[in-house]
Image (cartoon, helix red, strand yellow):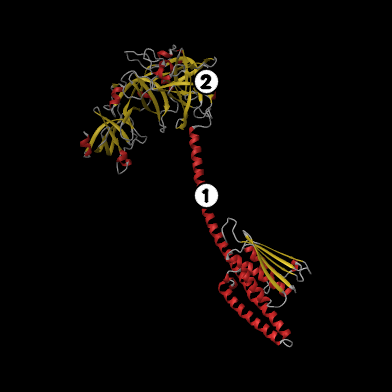
Amino acid sequence: MGAEELAERPPIDVEGIALTTLSTDGRRIMLWQDGVALFADATRNPDGAESVLPDREIVPGDRLRVTGHGKESFVAPLIVPSKIEWLGSGDLPEAPTVDLIEMSSGRLSSQWVRVEGVVQAVKPFPDQKRFWLLQIATPHGRFTARLEKESDDAPTQWVDAVVAVRGVCLHIFNHRGESIGPRLHVNGASEITVLEHPPRDPFALPDTPLDNLQPFTPHEVMPHRKKVRGTVTFCRPGSHLYIQNEGRGVRIVTSDTTVFHPGDQVEAAGFVVPGAHFSEIHQAILRKVDSAPAPVPLQLETPLPELMRLPFEQTPFKDLHGRLVELGGVLELSGEDADGRWMSLVSDGVAAQVRLPPEIQEIPRRGSVVRVAGICELEYPSTELVETFTLPSGLRLLPRGPADLTVVKSASWWTPQRQWMVVAIVGILLLLALAWVHTLRRRVLEKGAELAAEMGGRRMAEARAEERTRLAEELHDTLAQGLTGVSLQLEAAGRALNLRPTESSRHLGLAGQILASHRDEVRRTLWNLRSGLLDTGDLLGSLRAIAENLCPGTKPVISCRRTGEVLDLPDSVAHAVLRIAQEAMSNAVKHASAENVEAAVEFGATEVILTVTDDGCGFKPGAAAGADPAHFGLQGMRGRARRLDGQFEVNSTPGEGTTVRATIPHHRSNGTEL
């Protein structure tokens, strides 16, 4: 019945022989009917398998009647049974003898067959405790057989025996439904017939030279065990080891956990299996027969590129694979993958991969010159179809421990990678510094603005205070001096009132003139803070006018004189000289009881010098009245001189008069006028 017919789920009613049950509960049965295999799967019945199966256990050879419907399947025709009837016991059919090529084709899928081969291993079946897994080799290749367990004792007596095995030919599929190899399902030990027993002592076999493990032959030869002898060069207990003898090396795969050391002489009995490019020995049993010093690695002195280009008849690569060699080069790279840590060794432009064992903890720095001893494994281009003789594309070294790795010259710590790392770090730090400078600059600008605002406020306050002081000085020098002159005239008028009425009237008239003059002066001072006495531009004449107002025809006698060529002084300088002179003369009239006062002005090239001298009572300069709301005195004169970068000094001794001297520059230090 074809796949198209089965896809229409036709009703089926067949009788056949149960070849095997693929599950312990008997729900999945392989049937045999007239040379055709059928697969009855009761687990697919929607009503449950219990309503389908007979009341008794189904065993291979039972005659059964199965009714149900068909279903499409990519292996044997599939029956979804609605009922399985037991018809009686019987014998299994005769199985045709086939080879591995026929089993692999798919034509015998689910068929009852017989295969001959050599049992190479017996193992527990992965994840299925009810089976043993047999590895069987034939002249055409190897396959596995799944054997129903009859006891927990592994049937190792079949190892290296030639057997005939009957069973159902199944296939192993990947998740895409693609066949990756055949497998034989065997009902039990009764289906295995020993055709040739194995030798009682595998180590009694003759020695096979390592260069003749699998010689070419035109005849079919059963793949029996072979015994080899050699010196251990590498050992991973429970996994594999390498031995070498007479210039050849070979890999031996074994589950033996015995620790063998380099130099041990061993015998190994196992099965020759084709490796990736060279034969290996698998399922080996081992025994130590002698000890010797560890072999010396073969020094690879020929440059690798030249070594790989040698023609077939000259190439030594057939002798290098599996041998203990030593190679020098520069460590280029290192890393870690699923198989462990590795490093790449470049020798003469060819990279060799070094697989590092766990015992090597520290890897030299990249660029170091090293020498590595280890087992050489040649690598070849991967190809499904062998087209011609191929040369190796590279090699891999398997060092055994730290002693196999020698650093000839350690690389400098200052590698290009670290240089770039330092450049990157410096760049990052520079960016951070620039960001910090930008932030700091912004903060400085903010603080500068705050300080500028604060300093501006302070300067404004100082300017206001200075202006108030200057205004007070102006008022003092105008109003106070004028009132002093008026007071003196009134005193003179009072003294002459009774004896000399005419003179008293003259003094009263002068007092009125002084009041009128100073009233106008105060008005002008308040409006423009500039002395009206300077309107004529004559400094000496202004001094004489002040002296006349202070003492018009009375004591003391005030005289004014000048020395030097008269200069056109800046208003600020002339104004300061005039006010200092006015204050000094007024003090001499009011406080010194002087009879003579002299005001002298000396014009120099860069400065003007005012000297006011009186012959009054004098005083102690340190005890002079300071700046108070009613009296500015000496402080006012000193302040006027200092504001123009001038100097002011007072020399006085009680009873000997007073000399006031003010020196004020009328040009700046850079030669420009004030």
Residue at the extreme right of the image, as rendered: 655
In the picture provided, is 139 more to the left or to the right than 355?
left
Q: Give the answer, above or below, for where 496 lies relative to 390.
A: below
266 over 535 or under it: above or below: above
- The spot of residue 26 in percent (x, y) is 34, 35
Q: Nearer the viewer, residue 405 or 408?
A: 408
Residue 414 locus on image (x, y percent): 52, 32
Corner quadrant of residue 168? top left
Q: Amino acid at mark 2?
A: Phe
Q: How many marks?
A: 2
Task: Give the mark nearest the N terminus, 1 or 2.
Answer: 2
Residue that carries the numbered disc 2 in the rendered image: 260
Q: Disc 1 marks which residue? A: 437
Vertical placement of residue 623 versus 502, above or below? above
Q: Secondary structure at mark 2?
A: loop
Q: Quadrant of residue 118?
A: top left
- Position of the C terminus by quadrant: bottom right
- In front: mark 1 or mark 2? 1
Foreground of the two, 509 or 249: 509
What residue is rendered at 76% in x and 67% in y? 620
Residue 62 is situated, as x and y percent measured from the top left of the image, at 30, 30
Distance between the alpha carbons at the discs numbered 1 and 2: 68 Å
Residue at 53% across, 52% down: 440
Question: Looking at this view, is 420 or 495 the one in front?
Answer: 495
Image position, residue 398 (x, y; %): 47, 23
Inspect the image, locate mark 1, and give the three-letter code of the amino acid beneath it: Val
Disc 1, SS: helix
Q: Are marks 1 and 2 in contact (CB under 8 Å)?
A: no
